[in-house]
Image (tube, rainbow, N blue to C red):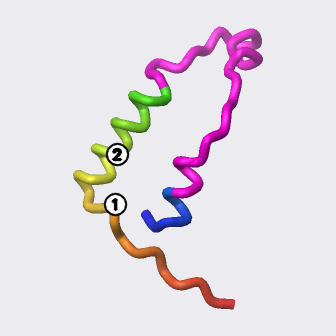
Amino acid sequence: MGPLGVRDLTREVGFSTARIRELTGWEPAVSLADGMARTEVWLRERGLLGVREPSRRG
């Protein structure tokens, strides 16, 4: 994952799950912090963190 991908994943934004919960009863199984920690471990295990992003052309 390159710097632009990391930037998109780490920017601070908020989303409410209230509407989807109202409509479907669905709730996240893990917190955002736990999900991000799990994602970091998964990416590191596969050697995907620290990989340079291809140059953009065009």
Relative to 30, does residue 5 appear above or below in the rendering?
below
* Residue at the disc numbered 1: 49
Task: Please state the total of marks drawn on the protein image.
Answer: 2
- Could you tell me residue 7's position as x and y percent? 55, 57
Residue 40 shows which numbered tag? Answer: 2
Looking at this view, is 57 or 14 the one in front? 14
**4 sits left or right of 41 in the view:** right
Relative to 35, does residue 28 appear above or below in the rendering?
above
At 34% across and 66% down in the image, what residue appears?
Answer: 50
Ranked by sequence position, the earlier of labels 2 and 1 is 2
At 53% across and 60% down in the image, what residue appears?
Answer: 5
At 67% across and 21% down in the image, what residue appears?
Answer: 17
SS for tag 1? Answer: loop
- Could you tell me residue 55's position as x and y percent? 52, 84
Q: What range is drawn magenta here?
A: 7-31
- Could you tell me residue 47's position as x and y percent? 26, 61
Label 1: few (<14), some or many (≥20) within 10 Å?
Answer: some
Q: Which image quadrant is residue 49 in?
A: bottom left
- The answer to whether the residues at label 2 and label 1 have Cβ atoms under 8 Å apart is yes
Quadrant holding the N terminus: bottom left
At 76% across and 17% down in the image, what residue appears?
Answer: 19
Q: Which image quadrant is residue 23 in?
A: top right
3D distance between C-alphas at marks 2 and 1? 8 Å
SS for tag 2? Answer: helix
**50 sits left or right of 35 in the view:** left
Q: Does the magenta stretch include residue 18?
A: yes
Q: What residue type is labelled 2?
A: Glu
Relative to 54, does residue 4 appear above or below in the rendering?
above
